[in-house]
Amino acid sequence: MSNPLWSGSDWTFKQLDDVYDACEQVARDELGLDYYPNQLEIISSEQMLDAYTSVGMPIYYKHWSFGKHFISEQRNYQKGHSGLAYELVINSSPCINYLMEDNSMTTQALVIAHAAFGHNHFFKNNYLFKQWTDASSIVDYLIFARDYIDQAEARYGHSEVEAWIDSCHALMDYGVNRYQRPTKLNVQAEKDRARDRAEYLQSQVNELYRITPESKNNKKKDAATKPFPEQPEENLLYFFEKYSPEIEVWQREILRIVRKIAQYFYPQAQTKVMNEGFASLTHYEILNRLHEKGLTTQGAHLEFLQLHTNVLYQPDYDKPYYSGINPYSFGFAMLRDIQRMCENPTAEDQRWFGKLIKGKTSRELILEAVAEFRDESFIRQWLSPEVIRQQKLFSVWDDRADKDKYVVKAIHNDSGFERIREMLADQYLRAASVPQIEVKQVNRKSRTLLLQYTEHRGRKLDNIQKMMPHIEKLWGGYPVIMVDSRGDPINRSASASSLPSNIVIC
């Protein structure tokens, strides 16, 4: 029996080092995890507030929205209306882990296992993070972004730059490439090419809108009349950066900065259930193994189990404080269920997942899922009838606001299981949370921009009136028209209000 690594709630830096080493031994040698080097940072409660109100980044450019969020969270915390996160982890190399100084030693051990090894392994190995983010460069790029915006404010005025960032932030969800892999971040190249890139882009914009119908050059005539863009463009910020007429060099560069940061955060929204579930499973296994080795006391282990239960608590749907599915609880339940199916499969498991679990260990399947899935595909592949029963999931249908009754569409039978799995997976598609808006066409002569909205499950654009002024601003003040998939107008910007209702864009 080994001596416990700590006793009581107070912690020391020596104890943190010892706990980190013990957790790393389990994570590396027993769980087979592969992770970036770790950097642990001890911060105060106010620093924690500051960190996660600026989207969790250690360095960020200044903007009023971060201060507003900070004051709101600070008031709620001081009044006891909300707590603070035990930890904050950043997808970078080295992986930066924030530990709050007010945490007990047991909480610090849980945080190290959860973030430094669970989240860290997920960041390094999941295909979305590998394809769409560059952990080695993000912090340096944020320094470049902060410095560039500070210089822009000094040169062009704080209010002018802030208003431009407001419009960029309003469309930040539309600064993402979902299918084309972005180029790697290179901070020195960004600095060196910032001016040259902007001047080149402006020359391309000028060429795009040059109308020469009388030209004898057939190639120029064809280019001037050819539809643009040839294919719809989903990345609005990219399109504005490249082709927006008559915006300044610094405005194009800030568009680029905001869309680069939006791309960095894109995988996190697609993997919330898997990421938190895997981190929760990791801390659960590491802390339990430390206890089995006699490295934690009985009291510390009971405190850990209480913390673990709080993190995974899932209120029932009919409770007043229910706010949806807890990703920690749901992801943990699905991963634990994969372990159960591999170790003690039932006839039902064999019928639903027999080919998937045959000849594989639970550890192999879990690490494979972490590497190859996102939330939507993970649920579609691995959500089992057992977890559906355990989580008390069912499907209801409410297609009209004026009805006072719901229709139960799926319950706990075979057809119900399939329907619940498909419907729940669909809710984790990007289209379920971010409306699908694409650049459809640009009129070279009037510079009118045509955007097309494709409905998802009949949802309307309720906030389009608030959105259009920002789109118009980023498009250089020229007319913007939003249409649906049938081509019927949904909304127009202020500068497009004088255009005829039957305008043809091409």
Image (cartoon, grey):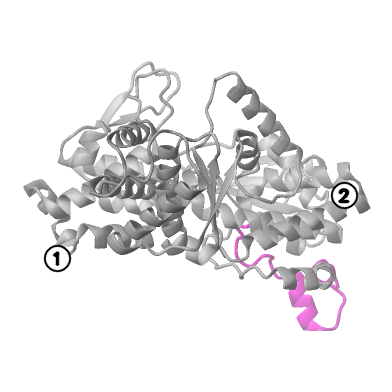
Instruction: Please name the amino acid that badge 1 sits on.
Output: Gly
In-image side of 349 versus 292 (left or right): left
Tell which circle, 2 or 1, labels the residue nearer the N-terminal end.
Answer: 2
Question: Alpha-carbon neighbours of circle 2 within 10 Å: few (<14), some, or many (≥20)?
Answer: some
Mark 2 and 1 residues: CB-CB less than 8 Å, in contact? no
Q: Which residue carries the number 2 mark?
A: 153
Q: Which residue carries the number 1 mark?
A: 359
Q: Which mark is residue 241?
A: none
Secondary structure at badge 2 equals: helix
Instruction: Please name the amino acid that badge 2 sits on.
Output: Glu
Q: Which residues are magenta?
A: 206-235
**Residue 244 shows up from this direction:** no
- Confirm whether the magenta stretch covers residue 383: no
Q: Please say if 145 is above or below 411.
A: below
Which residue is drawn at the image coordinates 71% and 37% (left, top)? 65
Q: Nearer the viewer, residue 328 or 263?
A: 328
